[in-house]
Image (spheres, rainbow, N blue to C red):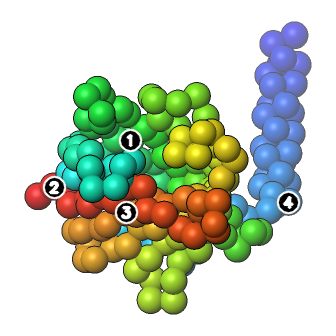
């Protein structure tokens, strides 16, 4: 009886090895990050933030904060930030990656001040210094009306980037509502 049990266990082990080897041979190769994914590494690290919200002409609302950006598998970054905003604190979480099928950068963002998850698509300029992401959503400056938004991140250097957020007004003109600067912590 012991002989049969050992023989059966050996047969099962050999069969399992054969199945695993056959499966490994038929498994497609996992994708590798592309140059567009490599570009995302520029964001990685700890950042100090300074920003101005331009809700009312001539009366910018200043704020400061910090951001931590991590890479995920070479395909994505996650940016988690927090800071002061209009007398309170605000935190956010953003994901950013490149979708090879769409040939576009894609992002999501949630924050502690709204119940909306923003979804973006965009592209990089030819110089590889400026990422423009576009989306549509309710605009507080237009009474919550569905509006086009454009968020632009420009790397001035490896340790400094600037951020501008705009919305399209009722005349079809882009209005800057938010400006920010991120400096890498040393």
- Tag 2 and tag 3, C-beta contact below 8 Å: no
Comes first in the chain, label 4 or label 2: 4
Tag 3's secondary structure? Answer: strand
Query: Which one is nearer the viewer's eye here, 33 or 3?
Result: 33
Q: Could you tell me how far apart the alpha carbons at marks 4 and 2 are, in whole angstroms?
A: 46 Å
Residue under pointer 2: 185
The residue where tag 1 is placed is 80
In this picture, is 166 found above or below 93?
Answer: below
- Number of the front mark, 1 or 4: 1
Contact (Cβ within 8 Å) of mark 4 with mark 2: no
Lower position in the chain sequence, tag 1 or tag 4: 4
Q: Position of residue 81 (x, y in %)?
A: 34, 41
Check the picture and name the quadrant holding the N terminus.
Answer: top right
Q: Quadrant of the C terminus?
A: bottom left
Q: Earlier in the sequence, mark 4 or mark 3?
A: 4
Q: CA distance from mark 1 to mark 2?
A: 15 Å
The answer to whether one can see residue 151 in this image is no
Q: Marks 3/1: CA distance?
A: 15 Å
Q: Answer with mark 2 or mark 3, whichever residue precedes in sequence.
A: 3
Q: Position of residue 20 (x, y in %)?
A: 79, 46
Q: Which mark is on residue 137? A: none
Are there few (<14), some (14-19), or many (20+) residues within 10 Å of tag 2? few
> Can you tell which mark lies on residue 26?
4
Q: CA distance from mark 1 to mark 4?
A: 39 Å
Label annotation for residue 163: 3
Dot 4: element:
helix
């Amino acid at each position: 009886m012991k002989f049969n049990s050992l023989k059966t266990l050996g047969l099962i082990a050999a069969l399992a090895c054969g199945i695993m080897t056959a499966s490994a041979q038929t498994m497609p190769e996992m994708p590798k990050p592309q140059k567009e994914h490599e570009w995302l590494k520029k964001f990685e690290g700890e950042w100090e933030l300074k920003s101005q919200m331009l809700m009312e002409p001539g009366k910018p609302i200043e704020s400061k904060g910090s951001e931590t950006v991590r890479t995920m598998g070479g395909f994505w970054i996650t940016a988690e930030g927090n800071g002061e905003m209009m007398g309170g604190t605000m935190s956010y979480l953003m994901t950013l990656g490149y979708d090879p099928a769409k040939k576009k950068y894609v992002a999501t963002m949630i924050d502690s001040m709204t119940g909306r998850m923003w979804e973006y698509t965009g592209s990089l300029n030819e110089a590889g210094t400026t990422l423009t992401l576009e989306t549509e959503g309710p605009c507080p400056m237009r009474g919550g009306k569905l509006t086009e938004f454009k968020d632009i991140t420009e790397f001035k250097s490896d340790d400094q980037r600037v951020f501008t957020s705009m919305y399209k007004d009722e005349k079809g003109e882009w209005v800057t509502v938010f400006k920010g600067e991120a400096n890498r912590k040393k």
